[in-house]
Structures are given as C-alpha cells and as structure tokens.
Image: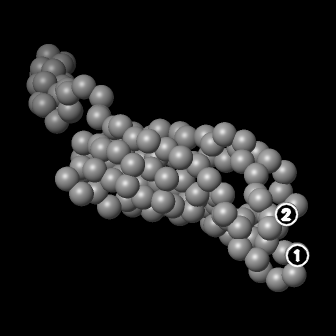
C-alpha cells in the first residue's frame, strides 16, 4: 500500500510539470458585426451576417465557428506574428427579407498545446436592408 501511495505521489509531481502554470492566454480583439444581402431572384434576397475580427493572441492556433446551410464549420484564422485580421461570414439567412431583427452568435477557439479556450461572442440586434 505504501508503494502505491508513493508511486501516486511521484506521478502527481511528474504530471504537474506537463501543465502550463502561466497566466491566462493572451487575446485581444476588436469585433464589428454587419450584414449584407444578395438578390437571388425577384424579391428573394439571401442575407449574410459578417464578423470582422482583428487583434493579437499568444495561442498557437485560433478558429471561428461558422454556420451555413445548417452545417457548423470551424474556420482556422491565419496568424501573422500572432496578429490577425479577417472578415468572415458567420451565418447565411436564406430569405433575408422575411428575417426579423435579431442577435447572432459564434464562438472563438484559441488552441495552445493540448488546451482549447473558448470565447463566446454575440452580436447586437442586426437586420437586413433590402434595396
């Protein structure tokens, strides 16, 4: 029994060396939500909810979740010296003319080693302007 406790104690000491003891990962960004429309035919317009993100992170990789046609996708944002700037369609609305003003949301995922930190973003109330 003493051997098991000793091995458990040694294992815990060795495992703590694998954990990152630094502060929270560093992320800074500016977000701007906006909408655009595209005429499909006649009075039918497809709406696009866009998110502009720019900033910097110390994460090894960074992604944004998008939603098109009922499918959730993870888009990995290119990092240049830990900085990023991107405009990305978060969701497509089939009939933008019939859509009521509402909020949209997405999540950002910051990857560092084997850890993933998630940040949730929500837009202000958005509507589509039909020409």
Colouring scheme applied when the structure was drawn: one colour
Mark 1 vs 2: CB contact within 8 A: yes
Kindly indicate the quadrant of the structure image that contains residue 99: bottom right
* Residue in the image at 76% along x and 77% along y: 39
Residue 43: mark in rendering: 1
Q: In this view, does 62 lie to the left or right of 5?
A: right
Viewer-closest of 28 and 66: 28
Circle 2 sits on which residue? 97
* Residue in the image at 74% along x and 70% along y: 46
* Residue in the image at 16% along x and 36% along y: 18
Give the class, few, some or many, for how many residues have Cα within 10 Å of label 1's Cα (few <14, many ≥20). Answer: few
Residue 65 image point, x, y percent: 52, 55
Kindly indicate the quadrant of the structure image that contains residue 89: bottom right
Residue 76 image point, x, y percent: 39, 61
* Residue in the image at 80% along x and 47% along y: 101
Viewer-closest of 116 and 83: 83
């Amino acid at each position: 029994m003493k051997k098991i406790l000793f091995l458990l104690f040694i294992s815990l000491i060795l495992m703590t060396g694998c954990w990152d003891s630094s502060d929270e990962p560093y992320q800074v960004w500016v977000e701007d939500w906006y909408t655009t429309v595209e005429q499909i035919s006649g009075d039918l317009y497809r709406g696009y909810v866009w998110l502009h993100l720019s900033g910097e992170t110390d994460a090894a990789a960074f992604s944004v979740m998008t939603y098109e046609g009922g499918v959730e996708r993870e888009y990995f944002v290119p990092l240049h010296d830990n900085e990023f700037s991107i405009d990305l369609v978060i969701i497509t609305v089939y009939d933008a003319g019939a859509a009521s003003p509402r909020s949209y949301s997405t999540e950002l995922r910051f990857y560092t080693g084997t850890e993933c930190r998630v940040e949730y973003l929500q837009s202000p109330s958005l509507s589509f302007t039909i020409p």
